[in-house]
């Protein structure tokens, strides 16, 4: 099959307890997430902070256990497997994080940071590991010079290259990149995005790209999913969603992004209020407290996910019933 990742009805709830006598509160961090990524493609999850996109990434990489739902990686269901059965998956799925500095060990030389996955997952000798580290450094645009130094000696962009090299050394099929360029200057952002694209072309890697920034997502994605309060409210091919957004939340997000092409410029949609707490999500459509188009039905009934005219374009909104 050509599908590298399939996620179905993923849910994650956390229990919060504030003290012995208080009633436990449940937070639904992820309540309804389904999507697929094809081999060699990029699927981006977008949404404001706290919408559950990072939690989704952590569920897929099994840094967190899902409460419900299924995750298939290259045809194998991993959501029901124990840690001891995840060896293969631990190699073929790698992560890149927003702040490479925080995710890189400050006491290790760059060459040790990059070689660490090889030590965990392979029996290669020290010299074989060294050879692979030098190869991968070159692939990400670094050199032997960087190998012998410490991550803190480098700029944010170079540190992200180190993080990418570390993710790449196991030749993963899927990389989950959680806000990988959000901490970088715009000019450095595009260098890193171009590097990720080049690596995709060269090695056929798939990305799950997590970002709050639609202009970044536009640059890198084949398909996108827009998340609000733990659920994907609209998903589809990037070009369709950008040109023809159907969910009011997607429209609002897109209307706040500067667009060069005047034909694609959207009427500005201003959202009311703040994102509600996931501890106490609104009834019906969870977006109704902020939606400028909300109707009576929106407070009572959760809208169903509907397929739109374009292939693989879905949205969940009562306006589509009319
Ligand atoms: Fe707005 Fe209603 Fe659609 Fe929700 S279902 S996005 S409240 S119109
Ligand atoms: Mg996050």
Image: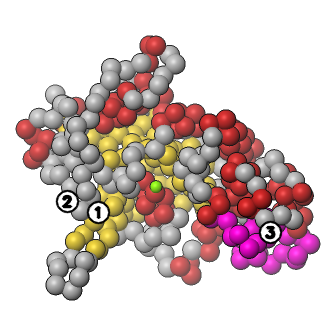
- Residue at 28%, 65% (x, y): give it: 27
Q: Nearer the viewer, residue 269 or 312?
A: 269
Q: Secondary structure at mark 1?
A: strand
Report how far apart the C-alphas of labels 1 and 3 lie in the structure: 40 Å
Within 10 Å of the Cα at label 3, are there few (<14), some (14-19), or many (20+) other Cα atoms? some
The CA distance from mark 1 to mark 2 is 9 Å
Q: Viewer-proximal residue, 144 or 236?
A: 144
Locate residue 68 relative to residue 137 in the image: left or right. left
* Region of the chain picked out in magenta, as a range: 103-129
Reply above or below: 102 against 53: below
Residue corresponding to mark 3: 109
Residue 232, image x, y percentages: 35, 47
| Mark 1 closeness class: few <14, some 14–19, many ≥20 residues within 10 Å | many
In the rendered image, residue 91, in percent from the top left (x then y), is placed at 66, 67
Q: Quadrant of residue 267?
A: top left
- Farthest front residue? 153
Q: Is residue 227 left or right of residue 6?
A: left
Query: Residue under circle 1?
Result: 28
Where does residue 31 sit, x and y in percent of width and height? 30, 58
Magenta segment includes 315: no
Q: Which sits earlier in the primary sequence, circle 2 or circle 3?
A: 3
Foreground mark, 1 or 3, reads 3
Most common secondary structure along the magenta stretch = helix
């Amino acid at each position: 099959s050509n599908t590298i990742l399939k996620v179905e009805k993923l849910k994650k709830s956390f229990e919060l307890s504030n003290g012995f006598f208080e009633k436990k509160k449940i937070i639904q961090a992820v309540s309804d997430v389904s999507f697929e990524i094809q081999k060699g493609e990029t699927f981006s999850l977008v949404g404001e902070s706290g919408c559950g996109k990072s939690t989704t990434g952590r569920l897929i990489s099994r840094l967190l256990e899902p409460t419900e739902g299924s995750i298939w990686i290259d045809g194998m269901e991993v959501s029901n497997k124990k840690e001891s059965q995840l060896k293969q998956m631990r190699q073929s799925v790698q992560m890149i994080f927003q702040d490479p500095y925080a995710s890189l060990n400050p006491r290790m030389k760059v060459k040790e940071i990059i070689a660490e996955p090889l030590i965990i997952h392979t029996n290669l000798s020290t010299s074989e590991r060294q050879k692979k580290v030098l190869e991968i450094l070159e692939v990400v645009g670094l050199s032997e010079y960087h190998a012998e130094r410490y991550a803190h000696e480098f700029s944010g962009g170079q540190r992200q290259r180190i993080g990418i090299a570390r993710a790449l050394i196991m030749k993963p099929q899927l990389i989950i990149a959680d806000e990988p360029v959000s901490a970088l200057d715009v000019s450095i952002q595009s260098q890193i995005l171009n590097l990720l694209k080049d690596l995709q072309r060269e090695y056929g890697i798939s990305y799950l790209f997590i970002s709050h920034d639609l202009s970044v997502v536009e640059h890198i994605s084949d398909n996108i999913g827009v998340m609000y309060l733990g659920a994907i409210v609209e998903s589809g091919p990037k070009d369709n969603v950008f040109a023809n957004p159907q969910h009011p939340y997607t429209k609002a997000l897109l209307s706040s992004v500067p667009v060069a092409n005047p034909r694609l410029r959207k009427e500005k949609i201003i959202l009311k209020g703040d994102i509600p707490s996931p501890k106490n999500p609104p009834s019906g459509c969870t977006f109704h407290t902020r939606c400028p188009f909300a109707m009576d039905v929106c407070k009572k009934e959760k809208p169903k996910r509907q397929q739109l005219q374009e292939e693989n374009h879905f949205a969940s909104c009562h306006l589509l019933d009319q």
